[in-house]
Image (tube, rainbow, N blue to C red):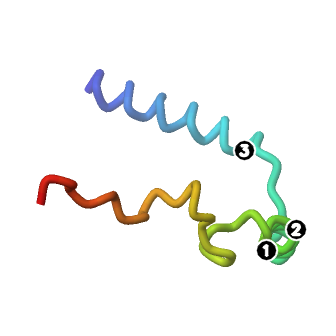
Amino acid sequence: MAANLQQQRSINLQLRREVKMERMPVSVACSLMMKYMLEHEEEDCLLSGFTQKVNPFREKSSCSIL
């Protein structure tokens, strides 16, 4: 019984925290995300690709012994 009461109190506290959060419509959130992506598309490696110096996936040099 005490465990159930403690669980209900923690759920209640979580719901109180969530009620205080500022909310916005999905359309506004999507437009803000699209604006951010368009402003930062030059820095996006998936769109522009890696430069040779910072490419973490470039082939390592082969073994010189072989």
Determine the image quadrant of residue 62.
bottom left
Q: Secondary structure at mark 2?
A: helix
In this view, the residue in front, 59 or 5, is: 59
The three-letter amino acid code for the residue at tag 3 is: Val
Few, some or many C-alpha atoms within 10 Å of disc 2 (few <14, some 14-19, many ≥20)?
few
Of badges 1 and 3, the one in the foreground is 1
Give the mark nearer the N terminus: 1 vs 3: 3
25 over 2 or under it: above or below: below
Question: Is 27 placed left or right of 59 in the picture?
Answer: right
Residue 40: image x %, image y %?
81, 65
Q: Residue at x 38, y 25 (%)?
A: 6
Give the mark nearer the N terminus: 2 vs 3: 3
Label 1, on which residue? 30
In this view, the residue in front, 66 or 52, is: 66
The three-letter amino acid code for the residue at tag 2 is: Glu
Q: Are marks 1 and 2 in contact (CB under 8 Å)?
A: no
Q: CA distance from mark 2 to mark 3?
A: 32 Å
Q: Residue at x 78, y 71 (%)?
A: 41
Q: Secondary structure at mark 3?
A: helix
In this view, the residue in front, 35 or 52, is: 52
Give the mark nearer the N terminus: 1 vs 2: 1
Tell me the number on the disc at residue 39.
Answer: 2
Residue 48: image x %, image y %?
68, 75
Q: Residue at x 75, y 63 (%)?
A: 43
Image quarter of the C terminus:
bottom left
Few, some or many C-alpha atoms within 10 Å of disc 3 (few <14, some 14-19, many ≥20)?
few
Question: Is 60 placed left or right of 10 in the picture?
Answer: left
Label 3, on which residue? 19
Q: CA distance from mark 1 to mark 2?
A: 14 Å
